[in-house]
Each structure stands twice: as structure tokens, then as C-alpha cells.
Amino acid sequence: MPYFIEVILPLAVPRTFTYAVNEAEYQFLRPGMRVAVPFGKNKLYTGMVKTLHQNPPLLYAAKEIDQILDDTPIVTPYQLQHWQWIAEYYMCTIGEVYKSALPSGLLLESETIISAQQGYSPDTGDLTDDEYLIYEALQNQSALKVQEVTAILNKKTILPILNRLISKNVISLQEAVSEKYKPKKIRYVRLQEEFLKEEQLNELLELLSRAQKQREVVMQYFQLQARDRNKPITHKALLEASGSTAATIKSLVDKNILEEYYIEEDRVSFTGSATAGFALSEKQQEAFLAIKAGFETHPVTLLHGITSSGKTEVYIKLIEEYISSGKQVLYLLPEIALTTQLVHRLTAYFGNKVAVFHSKYTNNERVEVWQQVLQGSDKAQVVIGARSALFLPFESLGLIVIDEEHEQTFKQQDPAPRYHARDAAIVLAHAYGAKVLLGSATPSIESYTNVQSGKYALVEMKERFGKVLPPEIVLIDLKDKYKRKQMTGHFSDTLTEAIAETLVLGKQVILFQNRRGFSPWVECMTCGHVPQCPQCDVSLTYYKYKNQLRCHYCAYHIAMPTHCHQCHSTDISTKGFGTEQIEQELKMLFPAKNSWRMDQDTTRGKHGYEKIIDAFKNREIDILVGTQMLAKGLHFDNVGMVGILNADNMLYQPDFRAFERAYQMMVQVAGRAGRKNDRGMVYIQTYNPLHNVIRQVTENDYEGMFREQLYERHNFKYPPYFRMVRIILKHKDYEKLKNGAMWLYNVLAQQLNIPVLGPEEPAISRIRNEYIRTIMVKIPLGAALGTTKRQIQKTLDSMDAIAQYRSIKVTVNADPY
Ligand code: ADP
Ligand code: ZN
Ligand code: ZN
């Protein structure tokens, strides 16, 4: 009887592959274990067992596996099932899901490059002979390919050895992010077990009566232990407490009285504070109970609470209930940069039960959290993470909290899987029988629709915590201000005065402008020429400080020209304005004050974002100018006012969600004003003070916005009434792309009995020298979603079979919003 396994490979190949195993392996293996398998030309990959069976493949002879890599599964059956769902729903391969789900530390392959982990030095007995050989090789050579290790050890089966070296922190994988935490090994001492009983202790002290110094160390050891029974005693602590020398301790170790051992200090460890207790306010308590009641009848509850209503504290109490009943909790955030603040709040309450998982962590760190979650460790009862934390191997998931559920960053745009973490989380929770709490001050139209249809329960919090009034919103009519010549640069007199008054009171100011750079384009005043990126179909953004024109889509940049490249005129003018310009104007308007800018340009680097936030929290910055980064749930206590410099460029975006987003952005930014005790002020400069969305923001009329947008969505066939699948085609050859896109459009339009739009030249129709066309398929609510997607996929496969179109790059994005 032959034995086979179906293996998922971390590649964009459309299916699983069959490998042969022997009977013993067949008995041992289970889905979710990793196997090293040969694939392609002499390449080794880390594959994942999906199923076991006895049917030989029809089209090829099954190769044998190289090696089993795990003793027990490292992913759960729930995950395998979830991967399959993601692959089907988001129209990618299960290999792509697998590849992005696992930390690359668990995905060694032939080409993987390994290097020595800094700060490791071996002690005798730490490493096996094979392990030591690799360690040694890496002392002489900065990096090795996995393939090269095969040669060093003269062995085929090396992945298990490398996996062990990773978990022992001897080696690490080369990765773009540099290693942040140096794992520290801490030396501990303990008494050999036989001396633990009291009578033996007396014997021991007697034994040491002629070695006074050693006796003293043992006495001190007991004192330290008496202080805290369960706390391990470090070598250092014993040294200090006994005032003895390392030699004395060593002689006790040599006599087999004390024993030394090492524990790796957790790379990510937090100290909880005992003062973290708080009581929910009456409104919070009501919301807390209502959420629990909601969960009795609904798997998902939406908490619609205005900014500063105290949603986080409600989450905390709820999380507490779940972990005390032994369940794991996942807390998803839209933005890695928000984790610092939240980690502080949660660890103050839960101490070391909180783990953090996100892409900026190193491989070794991610592997560690992965293992903790898999083992149901106490250290990972609550996991905070951005969207990729969804892929952790939860063994008993009870609750998923999705904070700021309306945020578009929950959707992964590139690469595949192009999944929406909120939606995928709800599917995952269903498999575990877990509950999902969505929280937002400005829920997405989709989630609110699900409330209206009865799919989700709704809980509202309409008051700020501590009964602080919501911010007062003042509209400033720009047309009028320009007419009356009451503008200085981009600041109206009203806005300038408000800033000055706020600063006089010792309060801080946040200003919002959703474009970065100095100005989004420059224009020749003689011939109208606008410098463009030669590789992308966009105008170049002017950066005054660097005196450069830069492309926001590729790395292209040039010095700011002194004359027009077209007509040689020197009359070149900057148009529009971005954060850099606002910052400069502030330096003129408020020269004595410290103005700072927070956007993609100033927050590069690993801690760029945190540094600015900390400086602002510590009140080193008086005025912070920023892009939408400011809108994302940051909490500052001392912000007296918020100014929005131009509301209009949010409203007029070529996107069916523009109004929903503009509403969310303005309400969220406004919510940064006045938190702790005082009511805050918000000033909005606009050319359209009568615009419906502006009015809805001013009146805090979420439902009005919702109803109006829903009506538009219905009329124009958009979500939530239609699900969209966007197909993006790219090629350097304009004609080839045009023909291929047309071919695809015609076939889809013929085969599908639903709206197919395009092929369209998108607003930015060329990036990095590749032309772009898009085709949009709109699937009405009633239509069979799965069937339609499979039909689309089939059509794409047949396009791939046409030689002249094969080189066109095609990506598919389901729910591309
Ligand atoms: P939201 O997330 O709804 O915008 P937060 O949860 O950040 O609001 O709460 C706003 C502020 O009120 C925070 O500074 C928070 O620490 C404080 N706060 C909320 N609830 C409590 C409570 N029960 N006890 C003490 N402080 C609270
Ligand atoms: Zn010109
Ligand atoms: Zn470019």
C-alpha cells in the first residue's frame, strides 16, 4: 500500500503537490506539520502537510519527502481551513497564503541566507556537533546559504538542525529589518533538589561549617527564596546579597550543592504596574453588559462609541473575562505605530499576559510569539497585532477585538493574499466559535449595514468619558476669507488667532493636511508645463527643504529646475500645498513655537513615528502638522484644538468612498481635540461650508451620512450592494496591454451575466514604466459569489494560455476598497 501526503508549498502555484512517504512517516505525520521537500531543480522548500491519503498522483510520479521538520503540528486545523477560505475568497493560491501566514523563520528553503545571531556565545553542552560546525562556519563567514550548509555537514537532512539553531538563537535569517533585541541569556542558580527538605538543609549547613563563605552563600540563598517563593534567583542577585565572589559560588556548583542554569530573557517583556486598576463608569458598564448581551444572540457586536468615550477600557474588561475563562484573545489594530500606546495600557492591566506580533518584529521574535500562542502559553493570552496577527496558531481563541474597524489599512493591497483582516477575522472567529467585537467612532458603511440587517448587534456610547463635551466645530469659509484678504499663506485670521489663544493657555495644537511635501506640483507660468515622473504618470511633488522634485510612486527625484524644461522660461510657480509648506508658514507665524511635521517623510526609520509621538506627548512640540496618520486613534491629553487646513481635497477624490472617508477622517481628527477635562475646539477651513458631509461632521450626524451614502451606493452599484473584483493588468508595451485588456474584457462580459466595467485607464495609468489597465466586475448581492469568482479565475487561466498575452502581469483584488 503506497502512502502519500498533500503538501502546500510557499509559492504562487495553483495547487498542492503530492509526495510519497513510508508507512512509519504516514503514521507519524499529521496535517499542520512541516516537511522539507524537493521541488524544481534541486531546490528544497519547507512545505506544509495539508492531508494524508493513499491515491497516487495521475500526472506525475510522486517524489519522496526529504525530512519531517516537526514533532507536532505548528498550525491548527482551523488555520488550514481558513487559508483555504482566504485563497478562494481573495482569489489567490493557498501557497501564497501559507507564505505570508508563517514567519519566514519557519519557512527555510535552499536559497534562504542565514547568519550568526549577535550576542550568542556557546557554553559547553549547548550545541550538538553538527550545530557547532555551523556556528563555527558563521564565525569565519558572515552569511551562508542553506544549500552551503549541506556541503559543510555533508548531510542532506539539515533543515531540522537549522530550525533548532534558530530556536536556540544561534543563527538568524537575513532580513531587511535589522535585529532589534539582542536576546539575553540570564544565569540563574538553584539548590540541588536533594537539599530542598529542611532536615537536609541542616545537614548541609553542618557540612559547610568549615567553609564559612560558602555557608553564607547558602544562607543568603534561603533568604532570597523566602522573600518570593516562586521567583528564580539570578547568579547576580545571589552574588550581591551574599557579598561573596563568583569563585565561592562556583565551588558550591562544583560540589553539586548549587546548580547553574540559564533562562533566556524574554525579548519582549513588559512590567505591569499594580496601579492599573480602574472602574468602569456607569455608561461604560452599560455598554459592557450590552456587548455581552449582544454576544448571546450575535457572533459579532459593533461598538459605536464617539471618540474618547472610553472604548478601550470596555475592551479591557471584556478581555479580562475571556482570559480568566482560559480563552485566548486577539486584539487587532489598524496600524503598527499604534501598538506602543496600546501595549502600555494593556500591560499596565494584564502584565506579562500580553504578547505583541507584527511585521516590524524580527523573525526570531515572531517565531517566539508563534510558539507561545500555539502552546497556549500564559505569556500570550492577549495578542496585540496588526493584520498579520490573524495568522497565529490560536489553540483556544475566544474573542477578537478589532479596534478602529473602519480603517482601510486592515485591507492588504499587496502582495497576495489581498485580504481584509476584519472580514477574514470574522470568518476565523466563526470556525473557533469565538466572538468578535468591532469598535469605532465612525463605523464603516459595511459594518453598519450589517447592524441594520440584524447580522451584528449594536452597542452605542454617545458620551465622552468623564462627561467631557465633544469638541465644538467652527467652519471657516475660505472663499470669503480670500475675498476679504484675511489669509496669510494658507491660514485664515480666525485659524491663526485660535492657534495663538490655544498656545497661550499652554495647550497644544494639531493641524491636519492630507498631502505631504511642499506642493504637489509645480507649473510653468509661461507655457503651463508641469514636470512629470518619467516612469509614472504623475506630477512630481516639490520639496522645498531639499530643493527637489520627487515622485511619490517610485524613487525618482531631480533637483528643482531653475527654468522650464519645455520653454526655458524661469517663471515657475508651485501649486497646491502639503505638510512641508504648512510647517514653514507656521515657523513664520509662530517663530517662538516648536512646530513639527508628521507624515510618511518624517516617520521613516524604525522608531520615527514613536519619536514624534513621544515628543508631542512630552510637550516638546507645540504644533504638530500631519497627514491621515494623525487620525488613527492616538490619545493625547493636552490638545486644545485641531485645525483642518482644507477639507475639500478630501471630498473630491475619484473614489466611491471619498465621502465616507472624508467624514471618518474629519471626525477622527477632530476627536484628537480636548480629551482629559476640557472641551476641545475644531476649526475646519473649506470652500464648501454647505457641503452635506461637512454639515454631517459638524452635527456629528453619523446616521445622516450613512443613509445618504447608502443611497448613493445603491444607485451606483457599489458595496454593500455589490461586491467588486478588480483585475489589474500591467505591461511595458502599451499596445500589447491594450489588446490583452480588451480581450479579457470581452470574454468576461460575454461569460458573466453581471456588470463588467472597463478596461479603464486608471487615474495613474503608468507606474515604474509599466502601463496599467483595470477591469472591474460587480457582483450583485444575490449572485453566487464563489461560482462567479471561479469563472473569473478560469478566464484568467485561459488568458494565460494565449502566448501573446502571457507576459501581461495580472493581479486580482477581491473587495478592493
Ligand atoms: P476611545 O478609545 O473611545 O476614544 P479611550 O478609551 O481612549 O477612548 O478613553 C478616553 C480617555 O478616558 C482615556 O484617557 C482613558 O484613559 C480615560 N478613561 C476611559 N475610561 C476610564 C475609566 N473607567 N477610568 C479612568 N479613566 C478612563
Ligand atoms: Zn514653460
Ligand atoms: Zn515615479
Image: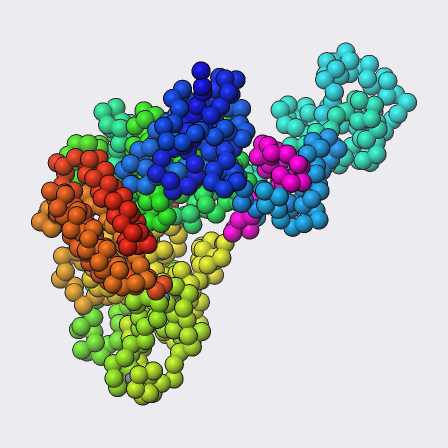
Where 474 falls versus 267 (above or below)? Answer: below
- What residue occupies the far bottom of the structure in this picture? 569
Q: Is residue 151 visible?
A: yes
Quick check: 150 left or right of 709? right
Quick check: 449 left or right of 40? left
Q: Position of residue 709 (x, y in %)?
A: 14, 49
Quick check: 208 left or right of 777? right
* Residue beneath the point at 26% across and 56% down: 666
Which quarter of the frame holds ligand 1? Answer: top left
Q: How is the image coloured?
A: rainbow
In the foreground, 295 or 757:
757
In the foreground, 523 or 317:
523
Q: Position of residue 189 (x, y in %)?
A: 72, 28
- What residue occupies the far right of the structure in this picture? 210
Residue 751 shown in magenta: no
- What residue occupies the far top of the structure in this picture? 199
Question: For the image shown, how many numbered marks are present on the structure?
Answer: 0
Q: Position of residue 15 (x, y in %)?
A: 36, 35
* Residue beneath the point at 80% across and 30% down: 249
* Residue beneath the point at 50% across and 45% down: 361
Where 135 falls versus 73 (above or below)? Answer: below
Q: Is residue 441 visible?
A: no
Chain part drawn in magenta: 149-178
The quarter in which the N terminus is drawn is top left
- What residue occupies the far left of the structure in this picture? 715
* Residue beneath the point at 27% across and 49% down: 802
Q: Position of residue 122 (x, y in %)?
A: 71, 38
Q: Quadrant of residue 465?
A: top left
In the foreground, 768 or 626:
768
